[in-house]
Image (cartoon, helix red, strand yellow):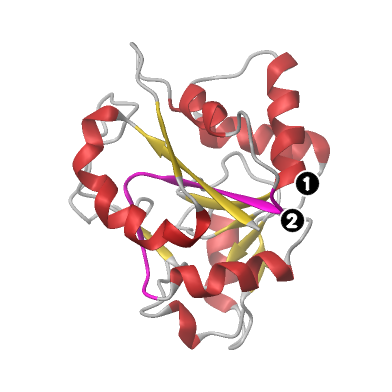
Amino acid sequence: MIHARVQHHPSRSKLLPRLLHHLTPFSPRVVEHASVPPNPWAGYLQCLQDLPECSHVLVVQDDAIPAPGFADVLPLIAARHPERPVCLWMSSIPAACAGRARRARPGLRYIPLGPTNIVPLVAVLWPCQLAINFREWAQTASRLTRADDSNVARWMRHNKVPFMCAVPSIVEHDDFTPTVKGGTRKESKGKSRDRVALLLAEDARQYDW
C-alpha cells in the first residue's frame, strides 16, 4: 500500500486542489510547515513523521504537477522497486544523471541517480522502511542545512543507498511558483532547465513501468 505526504507551505494553498486530485487513491496527508527563515528541510522531515503501515510513502511538493495516469502507474513503480527510492522528477541536474537519461536506450524506464550532492525531491517514492531509516539518521546527524535536497544526498552517500530516477519524469515542477527557501532565486517562469523536467511523460500510462 502506498501513502502520500504533501510537503506544503501555507502561502501555496491555491496549488493543492490540482495536486490532491491525482493523489486520492493514496490517502494523501497535507503536511504544512512555515518558519522564519524558511526551512524546506524541516518541512521535509515533518513529512516523514508518524507514518502509517504501508509499503511505500510518496513525498511530493505542493507545486508538483502529476502527468496524466500518475495514480495508475505509481503502484507499478512501487512493485518494481520495493527496496529503492525512486525520484519521479528530474531536471538537467544532477548533470551526470541527466546525461544518462538523455542517452538511455528506448524502453529503459529507470536509471541510477548515482553519487551526487543533491537528490531531486519534487516527488520521491520511498520504501517505507528506508524513509524511517532516513528520519532516524536525521535526528542525530550534525551539520545539516536548510536544503532538503542536499541533506537527503548526504544520507544517500553515507549509507550507500541506491536511488533511481524514472525516465521520463511523471510529474512536472511548477516553475512559475516562487521557491519556499527564498533568497535571490524566485521563479524563472519556465526558463530554468534545472527547475523543469528534463524529459516529461505526456501520459504515464504509455510506458512499461
Dot 1: within a 10 Å radius of its alpha carbon, few (fewer than 14), some, or many (20 or more) residues?
some
Give percent across and percent down for residue 93: 49, 52
Which part of the image, by quadrant, shows the C terminus?
bottom right
Dot 2: within a 10 Å radius of its alpha carbon, few (fewer than 14), some, or many (20 or more) residues?
some
Which part of the image, by quadrant, shows the N terminus?
bottom right
In the foreground, 177 or 32: 32
Left or right? Give the position of 38 relative to 116: left
Query: Quick check: 45 above or below 104?
Result: above
Whether residue 168 appears in this view of the structure is no
Query: Quick check: 163 above or below 158?
Result: below
Whether label 1 touches label 2, CB < 8 Å: yes
In the foreground, 20 or 154: 20
Q: Residue at x 79, y 56 (%)?
A: 83
Q: Which mark is residue 161?
A: 1
Find numbered disc 1 in the image and state the secondary structure of the residue it sits on.
loop
Query: Quick check: 170 above or below 90?
Result: below
**Magenta-span inclusion, residue 66:** yes
Left or right? Give the position of 113 relative to 172: right
Give percent across and percent down for residue 204: 46, 77
Look at label 1 and name its amino acid.
Answer: Val
Circle 2 is placed at which residue position?
84
Overall secondary structure of the magenta section: strand
For marks 1 and 2, the one nearer the N-term is 2
Q: Residue at x 76, y 53 (%)?
A: 162
Q: Which mark is residue 103?
A: none
Left or right? Give the position of 116 relative to 15: right
* Residue range highlighted in magenta: 54-68
Look at label 2 and name its amino acid.
Answer: Arg
Left or right? Give the position of 113 relative to 179: right
Give percent across and percent down for residue 42: 50, 22
